[in-house]
Amino acid sequence: MLLPYFMDFQTKIPLVKQTTNLIDYNANVLLLGSCFSENIGEKLNAFKFKNTQNPFGILFHPKAIELLISRALDDQEFIDKDVFFYNECWHCYMAHSKLSHVSKPVLLNQLNEALFLLKEQLKKASHIIITLGTAWVYQHKNTQLTVANCHKVPQKHFNKYLLSVKETSDSISTLANKIKLINPKASILFTVSPVRHIKDGFVENMQSKSHLLAAIHQNVTKGVSYFPSFEIMMDELRDYRFYKQDMIHPNATAINYIWSRFKDTWVHTNAFNTMKEVQDVQNGLSHKAFNPTSTAHLQFLEKLKLKIDKLTEAFPHMSFK
């Protein structure tokens, strides 16, 4: 059988460009959730968009995000009873271990600074992007708290269970409604992380992702948006070569591809030229000269400085090192 002259070896998810409240260089983006939210955040950083990423570190499930948003908006500061000492370090079950510290006062100060930052960003963000990683949660047996991070405390101290679709949907609805009360103009965008949580089990991971997807889509009709990061990974990039060596996390190629799809859908076209100028500067800053004292290189540095001055004058929030 003769093959067609051209064959398309990829099924592409049709995405429609957003028509309102697109991300540009006046936008202020808040990103919360799993490690994939930080992948997108790194892209926003690289192109010098205003953004804030996970003040409390990586958060994997919706209950953790809901509890912190509620705490921030209710001005409920962290106190001694909210932290614990384990393995020669102070921790908080509501935060990632990156905030943990050997000093209790330092930890409490960091937690309350993060709480203040979260509230301020929730109030002024133009876009709030929430990436959910799993519907599996751990509940501390003594306190009944659904924790954001176990901090390597033995599993015997927790009950592990899967949030139902209703529980997940209710959590999403609660946090979205709280955000709308304080910032009704913000665009709230959910996505599901393509990171594979196979430590829970292969079937269990897909069950978890399905609960997240079903719950988000129950809320899309209530004023939140959805971007299909998970589906792009599963259907457009349907190959293990797009994973890191651990076969769990998307690699740089996959992240760049998903970012390009996100940019084409959610970033305003009026930002594209500035993005190119920023990229040119970033490339220039990473350039290693063969002869740093040559006339050609000094002229190159002078032109690069003029580009930086032009960008920072137009966008004072930008900073280049």
Image (tube, helix red, strand yellow):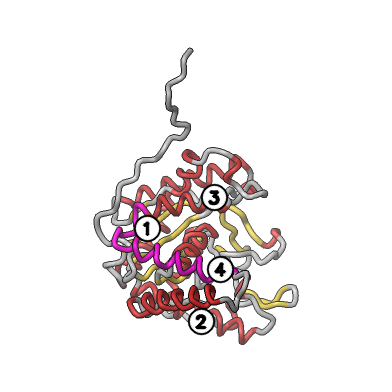
Q: Are marks 2 and 4 in contact (CB under 8 Å)?
A: no
Mark 3 belongs to which amino acid? Thr
Does the stretch in magenta take in 122?
no
Q: CA distance from mark 2 to mark 4?
A: 36 Å
Q: Which residue does the numbered mark 3 point to in the structure image?
A: 253
Q: Are marks 1 and 3 in contact (CB under 8 Å)?
A: no
- Tell me which numbered mark, 2 or 1, is placed earlier along the sequence: 2
Label 2 sits on a secondary structure element that is helix
Kindly report which numbered mark, 1 or 4, lies closer to the viewer in this rendering. 4
Q: Which residue does the numbered mark 2 point to in the structure image?
A: 112
Q: Is residue 51 in sight in this rendering? A: yes
Above or below residue 278? Residue 319 is below
Q: Which residues are magenta?
A: 264-288
Q: Which residue does the numbered mark 1 point to in the structure image?
A: 189
Kindly report which numbered mark, 2 or 3, lies closer to the viewer in this rendering. 3
* Residue 80: percent from left, percent from top: 59, 83
- Tell me which numbered mark, 2 or 4, is placed earlier along the sequence: 2
* Residue 100: percent from left, percent from top: 64, 75
Q: Could you tell whether 267 is left or right of 44 in the image?
A: left
Q: Could you tell whether 72 is left or right of 180 in the image?
A: right
Nearer to me, 267 or 65: 267
Which of the 4 image quarters holds residue 35?
A: bottom right
Identify which residue is drawn at 50% across, 73% down: 55
Identify which residue is drawn at 62% across, 57% down: 159
Mark 4 belongs to which amino acid? Ser
Task: Characterize the local packing of mark 4: few (<14), some (14-19) or many (20 or more) Cα atoms within 10 angstroms.
Answer: few
Q: Is residue 168 in sight in this rendering? A: no
Residue most extreme to the front: 295
Task: Characterize the local packing of mark 2: few (<14), some (14-19) or many (20 or more) Cα atoms within 10 angstroms.
Answer: some
- Tell me which numbered mark, 4 or 3, is placed earlier along the sequence: 3
Q: Which residue does the numbered mark 4 point to in the structure image?
A: 286
